[in-house]
Image: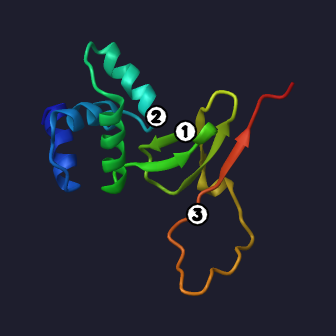
Amino acid sequence: MSGDAKIIEVLKDAGLRPTKQRICVGRLLFTGKHQHVSADRLQLQIRELGQKMALATIYNCLHQFHKAGLLKKVNAVNDVIMFDTNLSYHHHFLNVDTGELTDINKEAVSIAGLPSLPDGFEALSMELTIRVKPQI
């Protein structure tokens, strides 16, 4: 099965119509190792391939992929949203100077206790982001 055929299958399985834009973004996200990306970084990659895509279109694709369960959202520095292709339960180091995210294996983190949930709510997930910066 060709690369695009795999992307089309992933999109269809997630309930998304495989538009030209979604296939293009999916090609950058789902054909290699896990990665953390922003819409801006994807737009640069698309330009480097000699193609054009509006930033709003890239954001739409990323948010649709997230809603369909293909990506995780991670809040980064200065309200930038990063998207993570690694859907397994894990945590992150966030370099506040560069915005780079690094995965932390879930086994490396131990949390002894959690607060009681508000009445009428259930926990959906818990993610830990440790914000770091180089020592001076």
Are the residues flagged by discs 2 and 1 in contact, CB closer than 8 Å? yes
Q: Dot 3, crowdedness within 10 Å: few (<14), some or many (≥20)?
A: few
State the image quarter where residue 76 is shown. Answer: top right
Q: Residue at x 16, y 51 (%)?
A: 12
Residue 123 position, x and y percent, is: 54, 74
Quadrant of the image containing the C terminus? top right
How many discs mark residues in the rendered view? 3
Mark 2 residue type = Ser
Q: Where is residue 24 in the image (x, y as percent from the top left)?
A: 24, 30
The disc, 2 or 3, on the residue closer to the chain's N-terminal end is: 2
Q: Is mark 3 on a helix, strand or loop?
A: loop
Residue under numbered circle 3: 126
Which residue is denoted by mark 1 in the rendering? 80
Say which label, 2 or 1, has the lower sequence index.
2
Residue marked by disc 2 = 38
Pick the quarter of the image with the N terminus: top left
- How far is the residue under mark 2 from the one under mark 3? 21 Å
Q: What element carries label 1?
A: loop
Q: Position of residue 129 (x, y in %)?
A: 65, 49
In which quarter of the view is residue 40 placed?
Answer: top left
Three-letter amino acid code of the residue under disc 3: Met
What is the secondary structure assignment of the residue under circle 2?
loop
N-term mark: 3 or 1: 1
Q: Residue at x 37, y 51 (%)?
A: 66
Viewer-side residue, 105 vs 136: 136
Q: Where is residue 19 shown, x and y percent of the image?
A: 15, 39
Query: Is residue 118 depicted above or below 114 in this figure?
Result: below
